[in-house]
Amino acid sequence: MRTTAGTISNAVVPRDESALWRAMLQFLVPQTLGVALQLISNTVTIAYLGRLIGAPALAAASTFFPIFFLLTSFLLGLFSGGVVLVGQAHGAGDTAGVRAVVGTTLCIGGTLSVGVAAAGYATAADILVLIGSPPDILVMATGYSQATFIALPLLVILFAYLVLLRGTGDALTPLWAMILWIALGFVLTPALIQGWFGLPRMGVRSAPYGNLAASGVTLAALLLWLKRCGHPFAPDRAFVAALRFDATIAVRLLGIGIPAGVQVALVALSEVVVVSLVNTFGSDATAAYGIFNQVISYVQAPARAAAVAASVFGAQAIGARQSDRLGAVARIGVLLAIMAGALVIGAVYLFSGNILSVFTGVPGPRSIAHHALVVTLWSHLLVGVAGVLAGVMRSSGDVLVPTAVSVAAIWAIQLPAAYVLSRRLGLDGVWVGYAVAFVVTLVAQAAYYLLIWRYRTHWQLV
């Protein structure tokens, strides 16, 4: 159920089917826009580095990103656990419980981010050498990496707030905060690159330092807004008192967060394997793979939003002792994922030529990327459905089986299939491997949901 920034009532999932549709749709739209805006921000930042500084800066950022994603994946998983617990407490109308979950999540996330930042800053150069970064960009890549680690803790706190707010059903406030953060980044990054307004020229460090400044301003504005609205997340006396480590909550949080973090990390690692396989087909294939991934990130935005919506509304239903509404949450979530996904996928099919030309004007990579989209786009509808089912199950704290299914589909199905089929079908085998894995994932998630999970009792809080 969607809430305003200033309220946290005894939330229940609407009994009326049309009201539940409206509530989940009101959550889905801003959540999807938020994901899309974040992707646009990443794309524009890459363009700034490449066009305003040059190819070496672009290469420096590109070589570091997979490392950064792996190092922060656990934090992403941790916050997904926080969303479930906030949703359950919110559904039960337990304001003190919401504050306690947020306080513990911020303590754990903040502490871990400082540790990761310190270790990453100290070892950035060694890590880059270890992964074989080209010597001519090593100094620049090290500077970019260290600046990114400096910005990490504040960025983590901001995104923790934005993610946890969604647990109350509020996807609109995080969207406005995201718009402010992105807008500031759009101005600050080129300002630091070019030295506008008398600012120092920061070179390749401009993007992470711009993000640091944008995060600080956005977090301050968000806290002021929440305080004005009297929101439980506002930094008042009650919230500050809850800003501590609670061992009981931490156990519940990590029970959900660790499997989710492991899944994100293994997915990121699998992409390293895929790109190494694609590399064997030449530089055009590698360039096409990068373009393909950019487009697919946008295609997956509605599916990711639908999965988050299912998890939030499922958690609220469990907190409100309305486990009988879990079936409706899953059903509506699946339909929303299919409808939103079909709309985006259809648009990409129709306008793929125009979309791909944004990324490159070179015929070879563009043709390969187009073919990859034709082969795989339809299967991302299946990803959306499987994600919603996993999200509903995660809302009850059942994460091990859905996570194991997702990981096994990648490492036991997709990667072996891509390797074997690429030897028979060429590069097409890599794309077919994705589709095969997505089919297996949906079948396995649906089987577990329909045959086992839905017959369990889910009124207990995890």
Image (cartoon, rainbow, N blue to C red):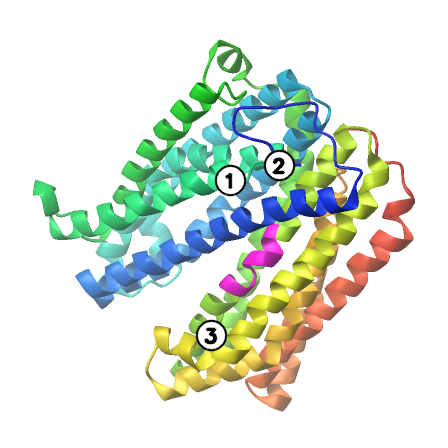
Instruction: From the top left corner, tell me how far across and down residue 187 is, in percent.
Output: 23, 48
Disc 1 to disc 2: CB gap under 8 Å: yes
Front in this rendered view, residue 80 or 111: 80
Rendered view: 413 above or below 176: below
Q: Residue at x 31, y 32 (%)?
A: 217
- Tell me: 184 left or right of 382: left
Q: Residue at x 35, y 27 (%)?
A: 220
SS at badge 2: loop
Q: Mark number for residue 191?
A: none
Instruction: From the top left corner, tell me how far across and down residue 254 is, in percent.
Output: 64, 34
Q: Is residue 301 magenta?
A: yes
Please give the residue where the numbered disc 1 appears in the rendered image.
Answer: 172
**Highlighted range, magenta:** 298-305
Please give the residue where the numbered disc 3 appears in the rendered image.
Answer: 289
Image quadrant holding the N terminus, namely top right
Identity, as a three-letter code, of the amino acid under mark 1:
Leu
Q: Estimate how packed mark 2 is, as few (under 14), some (14 to 19) or many (20 or more) residues with alpha carbons within 10 Å.
A: many
Which residue is situated farthest in the left direction here?
198
Identity, as a three-letter code, of the amino acid under mark 2:
Arg
- Tell me: 319 left or right of 300: right
Which mark is first along the chain, 3 or 2?
A: 2
Image quadrant holding the C terminus, namely top right
Rendered view: 138 above or below 370: above
Please give the residue where the numbered disc 2 appears in the rendered image.
Answer: 2
Instruction: From the top left corner, tell me how far across and down residue 73 is, in percent.
Output: 52, 47
Front in this rendered view, residue 136 or 342: 342
Magenta stretch: dominant SS?
Answer: helix
Which mark is first along the chain, 3 or 1?
A: 1
